[in-house]
Image: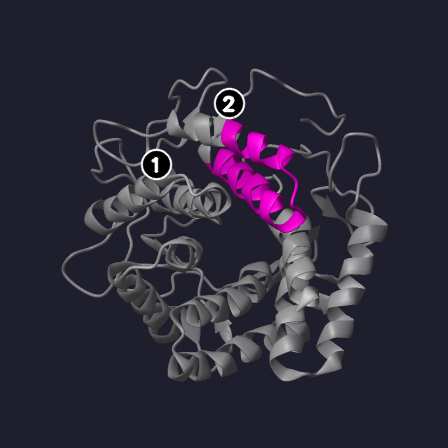
């Protein structure tokens, strides 16, 4: 759907988009207790199955509107989102086929997307048959990254979802290893922030501060530790989580929003839709963990800003992509496209409802 709300029915179908839609309607059915959402989830599930590569394993990057492969490349990030979505669909429906597919994709990541000769380092983009390919899809700012924080984060998220849906020792061990990766390689305890792009040994290759990913990571790390029900692990991660969230507040909060990023000495002050959604999640999590009402007030200030400026109140629209310094839409980017869908913002709503109900 473009900025003028025209739906392009023959547009390509990003598999990440489809997985996120599957997650959204599965979670919607559980949280809102609406049966109609299950049919929407089933539609997304049936379409996602068309993206499964029955020859080499994994899922394709994109399909055409009829469900035929367009880009056959395999990306660990993409596989992770399919696992995440299938885990929630299983929780909503108890469909054994879905959880079996989720575990199949988990094994594909572990067997074909993880380096075997060292720690739990995940590859990025590969060809259809899982041979090497430059990481085009998740690199930017003039670098080709062999490792990215973003892929590790969403593998963590996917494995957390899978473990909560149907726990197993192997997934638990994988989850523990990824948490160790974040604490040992990705998180910088001196700067209290995350690296983003790395070489094969997790040496940072670009001075980039990604504020949205940092606040998102702050609560996803704790969600993973909670899933494992390991009090010592949670106690180890809690200060890292709180330091990340507080550091983002200091570096990036410009009331009522979190700005985008800083690359070297250039500060990008664009207000991006998904960053605000994750900030609400992150600071609501801080409030619940610490009891400090300042974090609750911060989360609600950002939420009010979302309601005032990001919500597009035109009929059948959603959220604007981004805002400028005057809180006006700063571009005519699509309302829905392969990277924008009811995932960050939908999840924010579910997190508020479930957290405040507690």
Residue 306 in the image: state x and y as whole percent: 78, 53
Cα separation, mark 2 vs mark 1, equals: 26 Å
Whether 236 is drawn above or below 267: the answer is below
Whether 103 is drawn above or below 153: the answer is above
Q: Quadrant of the C terminus?
A: bottom right
Q: Earlier in the sequence, mark 2 or mark 1?
A: 2
The residue singled out by tag 2 in the image is: 12
Between 53 and 1, which is closer to the camera in this rendering? 53
The prevailing secondary structure element of the residues shown in magenta is helix
Between 99 and 105, which is closer to the camera in this rendering? 99
Q: Quadrant of the N terminus?
A: top right
Q: Is the residue marked by circle 1 packed among few (<14), some (14-19), or many (20+) residues within 10 Å?
A: few
Residue 153 in the image: state x and y as whole percent: 43, 58
> Does dot 1 land on a helix, a strand or a loop?
helix
Numbered badge on residue 97: 1
What residue sits 62% from the left and 36% below the top?
35
Q: Are marks 2 and 1 in contact (CB under 8 Å)?
A: no
């Amino acid at each position: 759907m473009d900025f003028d709300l025209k739906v392009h029915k023959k547009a390509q179908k990003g598999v990440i988009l489809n997985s996120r839609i599957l997650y959204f309607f599965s979670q919607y059915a559980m949280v809102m207790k609406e049966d109609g959402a299950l049919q929407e989830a089933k539609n997304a599930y049936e379409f996602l199955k068309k993206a499964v590569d029955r020859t080499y394993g994994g899922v394709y990057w994109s399909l055409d509107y009829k469900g035929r492969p367009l880009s056959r490349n395999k990306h660990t990030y993409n596989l992770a989102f399919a696992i995440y979505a299938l885990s929630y669909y299983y929780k909503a429906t108890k469909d054994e086929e879905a959880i079996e597919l989720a575990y199949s994709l988990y094994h594909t990541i572990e067997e074909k997307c993880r380096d075997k000769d060292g720690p739990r380092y995940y590859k990025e983009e590969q060809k259809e048959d899982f041979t090497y390919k430059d990481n085009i899809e998740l690199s930017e700012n003039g670098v080709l990254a062999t490792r990215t924080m973003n892929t590790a984060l969403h593998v963590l998220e996917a494995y957390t979802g899978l473990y909560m849906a149907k726990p197993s020792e192997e997934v638990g061990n994988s989850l523990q290893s990824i948490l160790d990766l974040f604490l040992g390689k990705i998180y910088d305890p001196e700067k209290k922030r995350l690296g983003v792009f790395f070489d094969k040994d997790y040496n940072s290759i670009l001075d980039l501060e990604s504020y949205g990913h940092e606040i998102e990571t702050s609560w996803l790390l704790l969600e993973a530790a909670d899933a494992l029900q390991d009090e010592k692990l949670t106690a180890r991660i809690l200060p890292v989580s709180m330091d990340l969230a507080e550091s983002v507040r200091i570096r990036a909060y410009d009331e009522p929003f979190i700005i985008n990023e800083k690359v070297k000495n250039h500060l990008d002050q664009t207000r991006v839709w998904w960053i605000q959604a994750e900030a609400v999640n992150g600071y609501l999590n801080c409030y619940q963990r610490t009891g400090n009402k300042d974090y609750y007030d911060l989360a609600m200030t950002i939420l009010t800003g979302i309601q005032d400026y990001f919500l597009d109140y035109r009929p059948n629209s959603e959220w604007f992509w981004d805002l400028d310094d005057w809180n006006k839409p700063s571009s005519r980017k699509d309302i829905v496209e392969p990277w924008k869908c009811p995932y960050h913002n939908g999840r924010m709503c579910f997190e508020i409802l479930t957290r405040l109900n507690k």
